[in-house]
Amino acid sequence: MVSKKLTIVNAQGFHMRPASAFATAMGKYGCDVVLKHNGKDVNAKSLMNIIAACIKCGNEIEVVATGADEEAALAEAVEMIESGFGE
């Protein structure tokens, strides 16, 4: 298991476009990827679960990856979030 705490930097937070891109990117990996936000675990491979979590700009989340390719999944997740999803 690997994890990292991050702050959402893009102005609109995890709205539809970045949530879709993130879920698609995490879906490539065989490991489990979870976003911890407000005491809840959110499946990072599920667009609907990410949207339902209402993750806004400035919110702190923790990305947790568990499984065979966890390091690669976490690295891509961190890069996407820290870059503000290219927005």
Image (tube, helix red, strand yellow):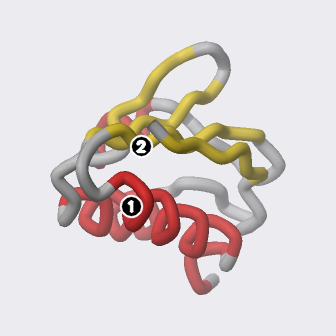
Which mark is on residue 65? Answer: 2
- Left or right of 26 on screen, residue 55: right
Which quarter of the image is occupied by the C terminus?
bottom right
Residue drawn at (43%, 59%), measured in percent from left and top?
A: 71
Is 25 placed above or below 36 here?
below
Query: Which of the marked residues, 1 or 2, is nearer the chain's N terminus?
Result: 2
Rendered image quadrant of residue 32: top left
Mark 1 vs 2: CB contact within 8 A: yes
What is the three-letter code of the residue carrying label 2?
A: Ala
Q: Is residue 67 above or below residue 13?
A: above
Q: Residue at x 19, y 65 (%)?
A: 28
Q: Position of residue 12 (x, y in %)?
A: 66, 61
- Residue 24 falls left or right of residue 76: left
Measured from the top left, where is residue 2 in percent x and y?
Answer: 52, 43
Q: Which mark is residue 73?
A: 1
Write the residue at 73% across / 51% down: 6
C-alpha distance separating marks 1 and 2: 7 Å
Is residue 47 found left or right of 63 in the rendered image? Answer: left
Farthest residue, direction top: 39
Label 1, residues with CA under 10 Å away: few <14, some 14-19, many ≥20: many
Dot 2 falls on a residue whose secondary structure is strand
What percent of the width, then of the height, locates residue 18? 46, 67
Badge 2 density bin: few <14, some 14–19, many ≥20, Cα 10 Å: many
For numbered disc 1, what is the local secondary structure?
Answer: helix
- Residue 35 in percent (x, y) is at 50, 37
Residue extending furthest toward the right: 58
Tag 1: amino acid? Ala
Instruction: Give the quarter of the figure containing the N terminus.
Output: top left
Q: Residue at x 33, y 34 (%)?
A: 43
